Image (spheres, helix red, strand yellow):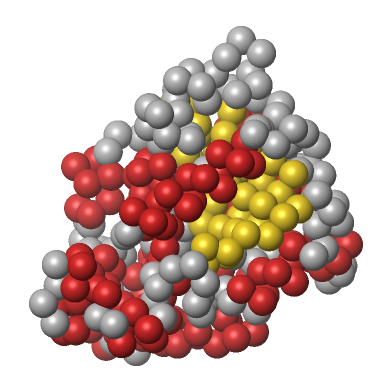
Amino acid sequence: MGTNEFYGEAIHGKHHYFDLGNFPLIKGGTLRGAKLAYKTHGTLNARKSNAILFPHMYSGSPMHMEMFVGKGRTLDPAKYFIILPGQLGNGISTSPSNTGAPFNQAAFPQVMIGDDVVAQHRLLTQKFGIKELQLVLGWSMGAQQTYEWAIRFPDMVMRAAPFAGTAKTSDHCKVFLKTLIEALTTDSAFAGGFYREPHAVHRGLRRHANLFALMGACQQLYTEQSWRALGFSSLEDFLAGFWQNWFLPMDPNNLMCMMRKWHDSDVSLHTGGDLKAALGRIKAKTYVIAFANDMFFPVADQKADQKLIRKSEFKVIDTLWAHFAMLCLTEADRKAIDKHLADLLNEKV
């Protein structure tokens, strides 16, 4: 298997690594010598009461969440200690692409959202001694981790902000994930997940990217050609320069690992399949924040979750960038996200 330079510090920046040791997984199996990559911004105060946790989305890394952190921003490191953990399987934490035989590549054990959250909990409590989080937030798979945190550790989470995600993956979303997986696995270069060189699977990665282009934004964005504001000159230029350019550098097995977590995400596993009971465990003041036109996680699906959370409010950000509004491709999206976070952090709990 070739080394994938995409996951190096030159692109994603320097990380810290928390040693998880031999880490048992919810679905069985063990990650041996597991490591959780993470970044931090700011300083933990003496009372350890200013911590915020911000896990990342599918295909991402802590780097992608750093755009929300900065002096004078809502997530100001002068005020908060902000922890950005890397998902297991993201290519930087323990992943199919950086694990040796016999558990490498397609033989990597199946990981769940709950495994990520348990690993993050160990980081916070064992490394930093943190007992409460002022806010847990995340977009898409970050929202799935946010829900898992608020339900698995309800006394620790003061506020929660799941963006563009649901507490349980819908059947419609599972169908989409099935097509994404098929886009990768039907590339002959995929070789059953034991390819010699990850970039050889470029046909599958391109198909995967084109499916994201179909579902990630909305029809009106294409009708109005709003992508021209980003400097793209044609539809083909946008598909290649934005969507394919995002996914082509990545390792297919890492993407598969994360997609399977996304597919199986379901907080009702804590309550015998009763989603109402699971969401009823949440004690945090919660803003469920949806993006208009989101086809991955439709507004109505997110509203249905919010109705089952006691101390919660529902917010919708009107945007043509739909699911991908969290990338702040317009200034209006950035300002709306920052405002909701500021309002939530100002809520008394």
Residue placed furthest toward the top: 46
Residue 274 pos. (x, y %): 86, 69
Residue placed furthest toward the left: 233
Nearer to me, 192 or 346: 346
Left or right of residue 199, residue 162 in this image = right
Residue 288 pos. (x, y %): 65, 58
Q: Residue at position x 28%, y 51% from top?
A: 7
Compared to residue 161, the image places residue 33 above or below, namely above
Q: Assign the C terminus to one quadrant of the image.
A: top right
**How many dots with numbers?**
0
Quadrant housing residue 166: bottom right
Left or right of residue 108, residue 162 in this image = right
Nearer to me, 349 or 16: 349
Compared to residue 196, the image places residue 111 above or below, namely above
Residue 21 pos. (x, y %): 55, 37
Q: Assign the N terminus to one quadrant of the image.
A: bottom left
Left or right of residue 226, residue 83 in this image = right
Q: Can residue 271 be seen in this view?
A: no
Q: Can residue 311 be seen in this view?
A: yes
Q: Residue at position x 34%, y 70% from top?
A: 252
Compared to residue 9, the image places residue 99 above or below, namely below
Compared to residue 55, the image places residue 276 above or below, namely below
Residue 20 pos. (x, y %): 55, 37
Quadrant housing residue 70: top left
Q: Residue at position x 50%, y 77% from top?
A: 293
Q: Residue at position x 65%, y 21% from top?
A: 49
Left or right of residue 62, residue 306 in this image = right
